[in-house]
Amino acid sequence: TIVARLAAALLLTQPRGLFVLEQGWTEPIALLMLACTVFAMLRVPSLAPWAGGLLVVTKQYLAFAGVLFWRFAAGRRDTKGVLVRAALVAAVVTVPFFLWQPRAFVESVVLLQTREPFRIDSLSYLSWAARHEWGAGSFLWAIGAAAAALLVGIGLTPNSAGGFAASLALSSFASFAFGSKAFCNYYFFVAGALCCAVAALDTGGPSPDLSLTSARTSRPRGTLPRSSKRAVPPR
């Protein structure tokens, strides 16, 4: 639809998009996995568990996507199978690195996020508070804000591909806005997630072609539409 195309154009033409690519940040990969997950949810549901599992392990802050994917799977028939497939593909791409060097893996993937120093130049409310000598806060602020936004998103959005992307955008934004480090690459992902949500939510209703097809197939066999009936001349 035109709205989905405009959302894609907005993502490709946002001012800092080329700068994110130039700096080599990994948010475009995370956004690609989100777009693949949303597409699979809409068009190829059998691939949604595999794409969703890869999405969750793409970045540390995408762990909240696991909660949203659990919600999405709970509304489907084969809930257990969907979750098992998602967990399987996530384990396949993650466990080998953990088994290679468990201590190094935990240090670099998990503990490093809690030990990083506060960035006064970050684009977050904590940076603004620190500049006004109200304290620097900690990573717990980011986790708390993301959890609260996640609950709000789950309560206000439908359990669909569009609701999945919108809730993830809201929780990610809250995590960055109240985090100790947040820069344009993080908000690039938020903007992309919002574009995915707009494109997915816009596909909620039936398209004109589908409604036309259903109208044709719903007529009794052997009858013609009114416009195609020949007028019988009076005798």
Image: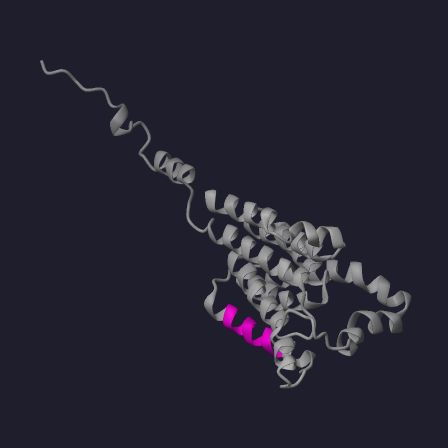
Residue at image point 78% right, 75% down: 116
Q: Is residue 178 above or below residue 157?
A: below
Residue 129 falls in which quadrant of the image? bottom right
154 magenta-colored: no
Instruction: Return the residue found at the far top.
Output: 235
* Residue at 38% over, 40% down: 211
In this picture the colour scheme is: one colour
Residue with the most extreme right position: 100
In the rendered image, the vertical position of residue 111 relative to residue 186, given as above or below: below
In the rendered image, the residue lying farthest to the front is: 132
Range of magenta residues: 143-153
The residue positioned farthest toward the bottom in the image shown? 134
Residue 145: x and y, percent?
Answer: 59, 76
Instruction: Count all numbered tags in the image, as a single digit.
Output: 0
Q: Nearer the viewer, residue 43 or 183?
A: 183
The picture places residue 11, in percent across and down from the top left corner, at 58, 50
Indicate the position of residue 97 as horizontal and vertical percent values. 85, 63
Give 217 or 168, whichever is nearer the viewer. 168
The residue at the point 79 percent across, 78 percent down is 115
- Of residues 76 and 3, the one nearer the viewer is 3
Taking the spot 58% from the left edge, 64% from the top edge, the residue there is 168
Please tell me whether the stretch drawn in magenta is mainly helix, strand or loop: helix
Q: Answer yes or no: is residue 114 visible.
A: yes
- Magenta span includes 144: yes
Q: In the rendering, at what x and y percent does residue 122 appear?
A: 68, 70
- Is 200 rendered above or below residue 129? above
Can residue 44 be seen in the rendering of this structure? no
186 with respect to 150 (left or right) = right
Quadrant containing the C terminus is top left
Residue 228 versus residue 119 in the image, above or below: above
Front-most of residues 12 and 62 = 12
